[in-house]
Image (tube, coloured by chain):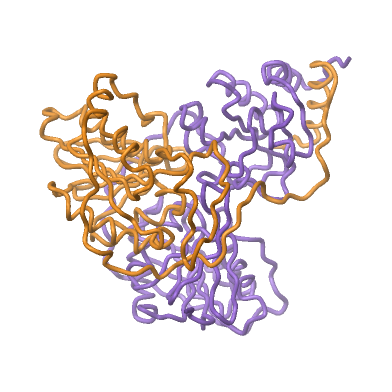
Chain colours: A purple, B orange
Amino acid sequence: MSAGLPSRICALVPADDADVMDPLGLVATALAVRGEARIPVQALVLGRAPAASLGRDALALGADEVLVLSHAGLAVPVQAEQLLAAFLEVLSPTAQGDGNLLALLPAGAIGEELAARLAARLRGAALGRCTQLALSPEGVVAHRAAFAGRAQVDLVSEGGPLFAAMRGRKGAAREPAGNGAVRALALSCELPGADASYVEAGAKMARLEGAKLVVSGGRGIGGPEGFELLERIAAALGGVVGGSLPTVDAGWVPVARQVGQSGKFVTPEVYVAIGISGTPQHLAGIGPDTRIVAVNSDAEANIFKVADVGVVADWKDVVPALAEALAAGGATGSA
Amino acid sequence: MNIVVLLAGIADTKWPLRGVELAAAGVVAGDEKLPRKLSPFDEAALETALQLRDAAADPSQLKISAVLAGTAQAEAIVRHIASFRLHRATWIDAPATHRWDAQALAGRLVQALAALDTKPDLVLAGREFGDCDDGALPPQLAEALGWRFVALAQQVLLEDGKLKLRRTRGSADEWLRLPAPLVASVTNDKSNRLRHPLMKNVMAAKRESFAALALPAPAAAPRVSPRAFRLQEAPRRQGAACRMIDGTSERKVAELAAYLRQWKVEA
């Protein structure tokens, strides 16, 4: 049993979520999901004081209707609890039990939490973090990873409203823009309190999201000392440091640096993978267009199957000298 | 304070997913035959609870119960968990049809919480609940209970009767102070790596007997179910075959440095 095609697709955009580099990327995703189907795409852009240009830009991307929602009481950094209350003020009257609604939220901690909780509040179904949504006459088919990225599954739901988290994609402004309208609405709902305080965690780290070059270490690095060298390489190349799940587990890098299925999704031009074997769960965190440069002592490591450039070597034989060579700026001697 | 740690376990990632398939309508099966273990997120949740007990002025007043969802190799995993000297360690039958639907599974876990002999003040679960969840289960559980929810906690403290939770936001640590009851999902961090149990407690757990928690039939049927299932060895990527840099270490370093300099990001 399935639900049939949705009658509307709604992109729910938390404009102040710092983890989302391009908030309107979700609108482009919603348009891609719609494809050729004749289904209206709505964008709900929510923030403390979202720029009016966000609404116009969403319309230019091709959204049929844009609602720019503001609430002066929203905390920044955002709190999911408050965003939930604000989205509910707008959605509850129309979306409660609306089997024809497909709602998208941005992949990431905030968006994924909101997708799950909105599904619960609006008597809908949560589809999780989807890589693709297909519209078929039988209904929405959600494609997502399972078993730590080692398997792919297609999920169907017996009824909506459906809530899915998806990555944003690049969209192009359409000429002329659609005939839709942008409406602004100031919300007044009561927001749950956020007794939060913040402590800067040491040196301010450059963000993985949006980095053009990432130097990442895996279990093969063997300890935190190796990451100091990766920091030097990243600094010399203008990149940022990442790590695999085992290195976060081991405490060699903070969780904010974790790349992979359970961590950050990165799309740099170059991803330098040192001591990383290339498990599916790690590779799931790297964009498909990224060039991978791999250093691994195991010539059979999976990472070489997906790398553009590879070096079979113990990292200790390569990384210290590489850090030195890059810091010096000149060429090292070659044999 | 009563803490319940909800654990899911995963198929050991060191073993290939051979034989795992869509076995019947809405049921992926076969993974129950593979070696199972706690996930890093399960372990982080359990260690977080143990640290709260360590810090309690009177540890006897802080009871930790652990509930494993699923019957596959449940007794062995629960025996391992029990070696941390918990108030109770048990498991529940979580139907295979429910594990793709976080809402249905959350309903089953609510039944489990109600069946325990202690009323929880704090429920901890890993940020991803088993092999089929990608983070929807813990918030769905909080919604089902009507409790506050904190995602991706790395540390939990009890201060002046309130829970204080730390998580990373950008380059800062965020500390939240909230009253119980509360559901928190826990992510892996250097501060919550699961300790090793004492050998005497491992031996004691070996002598214990364990039983599943008896529950009524599931309260709700799943609304989300798998229609297709495929194993994935590696994602498809663009580009040609890997160009290997061979030769001496010096040559490898020189070529690698030259290649990477092309991609240097100018400030």
* Residue at 40%, 43% in the rendered image: B9
- Residue toward you, A98 or A171: A98
In this orientation, which residue lies closer to the viewer: A188 or B261? Answer: B261
Residue A226 horizontal/vertical position (percent): 59, 20
Residue closest to the eye, A291 or B83: B83
Residue B6, image x, y percentages: 30, 46
Q: Which picture quadrant has residue A199?
A: top left
A210 horizontally vs A118: left or right: right
Residue occupying image coordinates x 34% and y 37%: B77
**Number of numbered discs on residues:** 0
Q: Is residue A50 above or below residue B207?
A: below
Residue that sits furthest to the right in the current view: A335
Q: Position of residue A133 (x, y in %)?
A: 58, 68
Q: Nearer the viewer, residue A160 or B30?
A: B30
Quadrant position of the C terminus of chain A in the picture = top right
List x then y, in percent, for residue B33.
47, 45
Q: Is residue A317 left or right of residue A179?
A: right
